Amino acid sequence: MRNLMTYAASLTLAGVALLAPHVARAQNVSKTAMAGAYTVTLKVLPAEAFEGKNAEMVRDGGSEPNLLNGSEPPNHHLVAFVKKDGKPVEKGIVNIDYRPAGGGTWLPLPVVRMHVKGKGLDTTHFGNNLSMVPGNYDARVTVNGSPPAIFHFAVAGGSY
C-alpha cells in the first residue's frame, strides 16, 4: 500500500511538472535602476488584495486597482518603489509601461499609489495587479517626467 501511495504521489508531481511551463506562476522579481534623479526598484510579485479582511494594500490615489475577484483575475503585482536621496517618494507622477521583450507596443499600466496595510507611508509604491503569461518582458518607469528607467525581466517560463 505504501509503494502504491508513493507511486501515486510521483505521478501527481510528474503531472504538475508537465503542466508547470504552461501556467503563469507569480514569482518574485526585483530590479533597480535610475530614472533621472530617482532610484526605482521594480518588483513583480504575486497579485495582492486591495479589499476585504485579507487586504494587503491600501490605495492612496491614482487609478483604481485591478481586483483579485475581477472579471479577469490578475496573477501578478507589477510595482515600482521610488526613492530620491534615499527617501521614499510618497507623492509623484509615476508612469509604468510594459511589453513583451524584443519590441511591440508598450502597454500602459493603470498606476495606483499604495502602501502596505499597517506599515505606513514609508512603504509607498506605485503600480497595479495585472495578468501576464510566461515569457520575457520589458518595463519602463518614469517619475515626474524623468528619463525612463528600463527593466528586463522574466515571468516563470522566461529566460532572463
Image (cartoon, grey):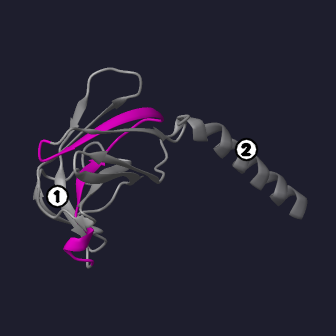
Name the spot of residue 80 as percent of width and height, x first.
29, 53
The image shows residue 47 at horizontal and vertical percentages of: 35, 54
In the rendered structure, which segment of residues is drawn in magenta?
119-145
In the rendered structure, the answer to whether residue 31 lies left or right of residue 52 reads: right
> Which percent across, then down, holds residue 12?
71, 49
The picture places residue 36, in percent across and down from the top left corner, at 22, 45
Q: Residue at x 47, y 54 (%)?
A: 28
37 part of magenta stretch: no
Q: Quadrant of residue 3?
A: bottom right
Task: Say which element carries label 2.
Answer: helix
Q: Magenta stretch containing residue 130, yes or no?
A: yes
CB atoms of marks 1 and 2 within 8 Å: no
Q: CA distance from mark 1 to mark 2?
A: 41 Å
The type of residue carrying mark 1 is Arg
Which residue in the structure is indicated by mark 1?
A: 113
Q: Which of the two residues, 13 or 88, is positioned nearer the viewer here? A: 88
How many marks can you see?
2
Q: Earlier in the sequence, mark 1 or mark 2?
A: 2
Residue 56, picture quadrant = bottom left
| Amino acid carrying mark 2 in the image | Ala
Question: Which quadrant of the structure image shows residue 152?
Answer: top left
Looking at the image, residue 49 sits to the left or right of residue 121; the answer is right
Front residue of 84/156: it is: 84
- Residue carrying label 2: 14
